[in-house]
């Protein structure tokens, strides 16, 4: 199938304005005739739902959590980028655009990235107007700090709780609309199928997670804002509820899945400490503003860090990348940490860790200043490890953190199913093969506050959409299918819990499709995943029943989807015979160990098309054209 990204013509700076002008509008009085279903209440979903209701649409919102405020976005720590150039250090919309295309290793769509940079400044204004308590300078100006892959300070933050504060802003806007009767909020619902009528998305079927009832919701358009799938690896920094179910099931209804192999491994997480851990904890990238990353020069050095003098330490990021130092992008920093540990220089009990050291920052700035900037992150580290990072260096190691892959969307954020839109981390997004720090919050809010209000209107004004009701046959059939799937899971009564399967799958994809991938390993994973899938059908043990709150059942559905999805992720990694960003194929690297792209053969988005049960997925491509930022070997030296 030929993918049409619907990129507007003309210079990149004018595309979005021109497009907004050319999009048809829904008359204000007609907006109340349209029902919109928004799935997810993270930053993307809450901002979209609030903005659409404010415009006059009737919005229904579903989410898994008991409150929209508990969406995974609340965990975001470090900050949100915008090109305000408050520090006067040379930033601009163009520089943010350039850094993001380069940071994504030239695997993102230029037009989308430019729009993202353009609206970044509006996001800050919007959030400030909502009362988001961004950090400020003494004189009242909003403060900025630096994040990886940029040589300017453009990250706005609220201590280490930026996601929480932004989500409270969006939640406030959402609840205003709930109060005004324009948003119907349905928490504790899990979307289990997208309903397509006459080729267009017209609603969804979900399970009420408290009563177990299968329910249908009809709409004129559906927005999936359901977050990323990093938990396919079992251990990740994502919230336990983050999952692939909504996007995977939409995929089976015709939405192409783009670049599923692009996973972000974040360099600064608290290292794994044992077999029974179910979560990993991020230490925000903002810490690399002042923390210095090092390992002992000598492999197997067991001295405590304070006993190792400076000339016996290898500050390897500063040594290898003098221009960007500790603030190289995440993919580069993660691989460098792995390389140091692979050479036997890892520290701590597992030897799979490197130091993030604040000794010099505390000397330079004073402990109080460091506490003011990062206090809650230091406290979190102290609570988890029982080590005081003001006194001893933190120990960190890379962990799965974000997924750049997701449902393929065009410039309007519409998937290959008309009327089905996808926003935030759930879409394949603007980040190419590697996301720069502080740009996920920017993208989620750009999609929700600024892009979808324009593009959804364009769709609704252009289509003839007949009346559809939740009582129609299409919904009843989908309900029956979902009900049968739930009952089938409960009926297996096997010997292994969903968590045991998930842990095995996670380790498999981490080992073979994680920080480094190679053909032999990927083929090994591809051989094992179908076996695991078959075993799951015969041997999973789901306790409890369907008629009430049952987290084992919820997990079972999600793990089943992860097993199916993992096969596509690994196939995508196998087919992409190059290294780019977070996708590091060991066979394709430069002599000094950097990712070696193959622009001649892989400068495209891979968008996978579901072909039916048991049939191999079809790989479609969207060529990437770079008119403004010309691809080169990414260098942070
Ligand atoms: C620890 C941590 C720190 C981070 N820090 C930063 C940072 O400082 N800066 C930055 O830019 N990014 C950061 N990120 C990334 C960023 O937080 C996420 O990418 C972003 O918040 C995702 O927002 P979202 O709205 O797309 O999805 P989410 O916030 O994940 O929300 C998904 C929503 O979908 C709902 N949902 C999911 N599946 C279903 C279903 N089947 N049915 C119904 N509802 C469903 C959930 O209930 C939830 O409401 C961080 C990530 C982590 C893990």
Image (cartoon, rainbow, N blue to C red):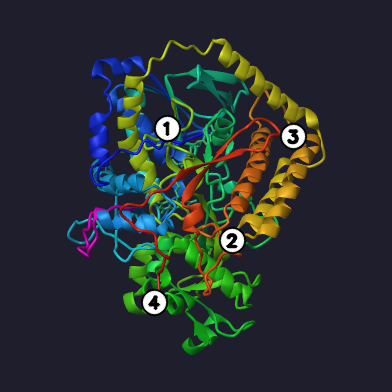
Q: Which residue is mark 2?
A: 585
Position in image of residue 474 (x %, y %): 57, 14
Q: Tell me if mark 4 has few (under 14), some (14-19) or many (20+) residues whose alpha carbon lies within 10 angstroms of its own.
A: some
Q: Secondary structure at mark 1?
A: loop
Ligand 1 within 8 Å, label 3 CB = no
**Disc 3 versus disc 4: nearer the observer:** 4
Which one is nearer the viewer's eye here, 405 or 222? 405
Which one is nearer the viewer's eye here, 251 or 150? 251
Residue drawn 54% across and 86% down?
307
**Disc 2 versus disc 3: nearer the observer:** 2
Position in image of residue 46 (x %, y %): 39, 35
Q: Secondary structure at mark 3?
A: loop
Position in image of residue 259 (x %, y %): 53, 46
Q: Which residue is mark 4?
A: 322
**Disc 2 versus disc 1: nearer the observer:** 2
Q: Which residue is mark 3?
A: 542
Indicate which disc, 2 or 1, sits on the residue closer to the N terminus.
1
Left or right of 299 on screen, residue 365: left
Magenta-drawn segment: 81-93
Indicate which disc, 3 or 4, sits on the residue closer to the N terminus.
4
Q: How many marks?
A: 4
Which one is nearer the viewer's eye here, 545 or 50? 50
The quarter of the displayed image where residue 399 is located: bottom right
Ligand 1 within 8 Å, label 1 CB = no
Classify 193 as above or below 582: above
Q: Which residue is mark 1?
A: 414
Distance between the Cα atoms at labels 3 and 4?
53 Å
**Disc 4 versus disc 2: nearer the observer:** 2
Classify 334 as above or below 133: below
């Amino acid at each position: 199938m030929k993918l049409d990204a619907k990129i507007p013509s003309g210079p990149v700076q004018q595309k979005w304005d021109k497009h907004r002008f050319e999009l048809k509008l829904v008359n204000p009085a007609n907006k109340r005739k349209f029902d919109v279903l928004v799935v997810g209440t993270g930053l993307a979903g809450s901002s979209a739902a609030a903005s659409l209701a404010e415009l006059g649409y009737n919005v229904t919102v579903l989410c898994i959590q008991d409150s929209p405020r508990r969406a995974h976005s609340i965990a975001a720590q470090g900050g949100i980028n915008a090109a305000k150039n408050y520090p006067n250090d040379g930033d601009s919309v163009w520089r943010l655009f350039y850094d993001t295309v380069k940071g994504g290793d030239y695997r993102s769509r230029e037009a989308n990235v430019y729009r993202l940079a353009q609206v970044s400044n509006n996001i800050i204004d919007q959030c400030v107007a909502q009362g988001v308590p961004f950090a400020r300078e003494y004189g009242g100006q909003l403060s900025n700090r630096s994040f990886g892959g940029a040589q300017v300070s453009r990250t706005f933050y609220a201590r280490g709780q930026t996601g929480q504060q932004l989500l409270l802003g969006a939640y406030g806007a959402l609840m205003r609309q709930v109060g005004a009767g324009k948003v119907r909020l349905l928490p504790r619902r899990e979307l289990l199928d997208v309903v397509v009528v006459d080729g267009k998305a017209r609603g969804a079927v979900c399970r009420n997670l408290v009563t177990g009832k299968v329910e249908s919701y009809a709409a004129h358009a559906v927005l999936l804002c359901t977050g990323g799938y990093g938990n396919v690896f079992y251990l990740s920094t994502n919230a336990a509820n983050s999952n692939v179910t909504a996007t995977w099931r939409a995929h089976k209804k015709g939405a192409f899945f783009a670049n599923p192999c692009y996973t972000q491994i974040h360099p600064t997480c608290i290292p794994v400490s044992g077999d029974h851990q179910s979560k990993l904890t991020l230490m925000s990238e903002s810490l690399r503003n002042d923390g210095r990353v090092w390992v002992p020069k000598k492999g197997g050095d067991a001295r405590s860090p304070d006993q190792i003098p400076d000339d016996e330490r290898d500050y390897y990021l500063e040594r290898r990348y003098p221009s960007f130092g500790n603030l190289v992008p995440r993919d580069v920093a993660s691989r460098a940490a792995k390389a140091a540990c692979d050479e036997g220089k890892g520290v701590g009990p597992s030897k799979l860790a490197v130091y993030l050291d604040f000794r010099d920052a505390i000397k330079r700035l004073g402990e109080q200043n460091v506490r003011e900037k990062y206090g809650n992150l230091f406290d979190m580290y102290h609570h988890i490890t029982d080590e005081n990072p003001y006194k001893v260096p933190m120990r960190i190691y890379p962990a799965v953190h974000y997924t750049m892959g997701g449902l393929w969307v065009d410039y309007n954020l519409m998937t290959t199913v008309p009327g089905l839109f996808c926003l935030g981390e759930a879409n394949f997004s603007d980040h190419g093969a590697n996301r720069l720090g502080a740009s996920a919050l920017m993208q989620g809010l750009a999609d929700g506050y600024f892009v979808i209000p324009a593009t959804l209107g364009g769709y609704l004004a252009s289509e003839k959409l007949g009346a559809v009701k939740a009582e129609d046959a299409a919904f009843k059939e989908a309900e029956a299918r979902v009900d049968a799937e739930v009952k089938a899971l409960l009926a297996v009564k096997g010997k292994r819990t969903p968590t045991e399967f998930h842990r095995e799958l996670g380790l498999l994809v981490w080992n073979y499709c994680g920080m480094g991938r190679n053909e032999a390993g990927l083929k090994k994973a591809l051989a094992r995943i179908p076996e695991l899938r078959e075993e799951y059908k015969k041997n999973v043990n789901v306790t409890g029943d369907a008629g009430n709150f049952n987290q084992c059942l919820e997990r079972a559905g999600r793990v089943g989807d992860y097993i199916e999805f993992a096969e596509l992720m690994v196939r995508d990694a196998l087919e992409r015979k190059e290294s780019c960003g977070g996708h590091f194929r060991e066979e394709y690297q430069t002599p000094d160990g950097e990712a070696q792209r193959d622009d001649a053969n892989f400068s495209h988005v891979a968008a996978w098309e579901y072909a039916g049960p048991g049939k191999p997925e079809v790989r479609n491509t969207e060529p990437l054209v770079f008119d403004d930022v010309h691809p080169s070997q990414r260098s942070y030296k």
